[in-house]
């Protein structure tokens, strides 16, 4: 469901170095894109793209980013147990729900009444989106979250979302035909929403928006369930927290209370050092990490840990610290296993290229930031990239 936020219009200092390196000064504290960065600056270069750098020495435990959710959406299999208003997770199916769309359920009448104004705009569209189940719950979840983003109240976080990077659509004939049918259903759903021009979205534009969500949304977890390997119960879009690059030896972690996310240093960070998070489970060997990053996020990790572990002698001495694990769909797991088998047969070692997944994207070497799903929080925890 979309969470209205206030609009923030603030300026910042833009620095352009002689080598073309551009950075946006965000220190000591700046509100931008629905979030607050502290002792950090946004930078960009040819190799890393946009990334975050510390602007001062940061001891472990420093909050470097606090961002509000642009939209939050329970996953299909959880929709009858998660309150659409307060996002509380019930131990069993909720009895209060919208009988029209059968997509939103509530703790009680008070939550239903509080959610009524925003739900009124989306109810008819949600009823039509039910037909997307035939295309898989993952695509349905992304299009449902996209609907909430499009219906969200205007604020800088929404503008930042539309500026996020994404992968260009590349699909085979079968995937192309299915995608066009799914896009037609999504436009049909948008036609039921006031204030949204459905005809203004082409298939490629919808795919670009879904790709932005897929690369930059977070998975929301029941407290401690992530450590037990459980899948997320909801997806959240936090555009202001989507500027942190991945590292297999990250110096920051992400935690959330659902409506807000915090990026926190878990080690001392020197001034000018890049602030990074982990998109995947980094306790596994380098080959497995590289394969998953190429499959899920379409880039080859070149962090200092991967570079060090590329040396054969170093691999035997590696120990892997615990980290949150990204939950994969069955189809993604099958694709990953197939690629690993192909890599073993062809003797490619770590260089496992990704194939075409439901997103219709082929892997490559392009740098793409994705956030993680994770952290810890009150009744739920989040760890970047859902």
Image (cartoon, helix red, strand yellow):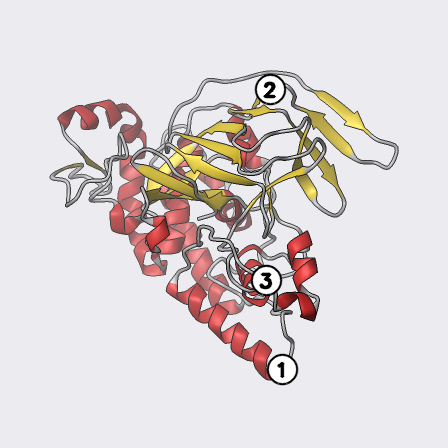
Seen from this angle, which residue lies furthest right?
Answer: 18
Q: Earlier in the sequence, mark 2 or mark 3?
A: 2
Does residue 234 sit above or below 149 in this rendering? below
Give the percent coordinates (x, y) of residue 253: 50, 40
Does dot 3 land on a helix, a strand or a loop? loop
Which quarter of the figure is the N terminus placed in?
top left
Given residues 147 and 245, the one toward you in this image is 245
Q: Distance between the residues labelled 2 and 3?
A: 39 Å
Given residues 94 and 322, the one toward you in this image is 322
Q: Is residue 213 visible?
A: no
Asked if residue 12 lies left or right of residue 75, the reply is right
Give the percent coordinates (x, y) of residue 38: 59, 24
Asked if residue 252 lies left or right of residue 50, the reply is left
Q: Which of marks 1 and 3 is nearer the N terminus?
A: 3
Give the percent coordinates (x, y) of residue 162: 56, 36
Marks counted in the figure total 3
The residue beneath circle 3 is 318
Given residues 131 and 23, the one toward you in this image is 23
Give the number of the mark in front: 2 or 3.
Answer: 3
Asked if residue 324 lies left or right of residue 267, the reply is left
Give the percent coordinates (x, y) of residue 234: 34, 43
Q: Which residue shows up at 54% across the image and 31% down it?
A: 240
Badge number at residue 346: 1
Given residues 141 and 243, the one toward you in this image is 243
Q: Earlier in the sequence, mark 2 or mark 1?
A: 2
Q: Is residue 117 visible?
A: yes
Q: Which residue shows up at 37% across the image and 48% down it?
A: 141
Q: Which residue shows up at 63% across the image and 19% down it?
A: 28
Does residue 173 sit above or below 137 in this rendering? below
Q: Which residue shows up at 37% across the image and 33% down it?
A: 258
The residue beneath circle 2 is 30
Does residue 264 sit above or below 38 in this rendering? below
């Amino acid at each position: 469901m979309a969470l209205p936020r206030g609009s923030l219009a603030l300026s910042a200092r833009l620095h352009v170095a002689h080598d073309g390196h551009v950075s946006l000064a965000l220190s000591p504290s700046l509100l931008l894109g629905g979030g607050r960065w502290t002792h950090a600056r946004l930078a960009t270069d040819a190799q890393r793209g946009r990334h975050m750098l510390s602007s001062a020495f940061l001891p472990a435990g420093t909050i470097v980013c606090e961002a509000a959710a642009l939209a939050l959406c329970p996953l299909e299999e959880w929709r009858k147990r998660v309150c659409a208003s307060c996002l509380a997770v019930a131990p069993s199916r909720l009895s209060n729900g919208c009988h029209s769309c059968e997509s939103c359920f509530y703790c009680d009448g008070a939550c239903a009444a509080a959610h009524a104004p925003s739900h009124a705009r989306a109810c008819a569209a949600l009823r039509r989106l039910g037909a997307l189940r035939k295309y898989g719950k993952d695509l349905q979840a992304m299009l449902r979250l996209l609907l909430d983003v499009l219906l969200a109240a205007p604020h800088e976080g929404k503008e930042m979302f539309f500026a996020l990077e994404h992968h260009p659509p590349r699909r085979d004939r079968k995937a192309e035909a299915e995608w066009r049918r799914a896009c037609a259903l999504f436009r049909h759903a948008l036609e039921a929403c006031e204030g949204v021009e459905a005809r203004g979205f082409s298939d490629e534009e919808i795919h670009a928006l879904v790709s932005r969500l897929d690369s930059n949304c977070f998975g929301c977890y029941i407290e401690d369930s992530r450590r037990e390997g459980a899948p997320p119960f909801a997806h959240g879009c936090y555009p202001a927290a989507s500027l942190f690059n991945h590292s297999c030896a990250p110096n920051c972690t992400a935690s959330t209370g659902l409506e807000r996310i915090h990026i926190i240093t878990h080690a001392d960070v020197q001034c000018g050092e890049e602030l990074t998070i982990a998109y995947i489970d980094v306790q596994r060997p380098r080959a497995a990490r590289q394969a998953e990053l190429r499959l899920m996020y379409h880039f080859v990790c070149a962090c200092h840990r991967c570079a060090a572990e590329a040396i054969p002698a170093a691999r035997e001495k590696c120990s892997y610290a615990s980290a949150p694990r990204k939950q994969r769909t069955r189809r993604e797991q099958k694709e990953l296993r197939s690629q690993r088998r192909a890599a073993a047969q062809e003797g490619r070692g770590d260089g496992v290229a990704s194939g075409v997944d439901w997103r219709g994207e082929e892997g490559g070497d392009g740098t793409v930031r994705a956030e993680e799903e994770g952290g810890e929080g009150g009744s739920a925890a989040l760890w970047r990239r859902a």
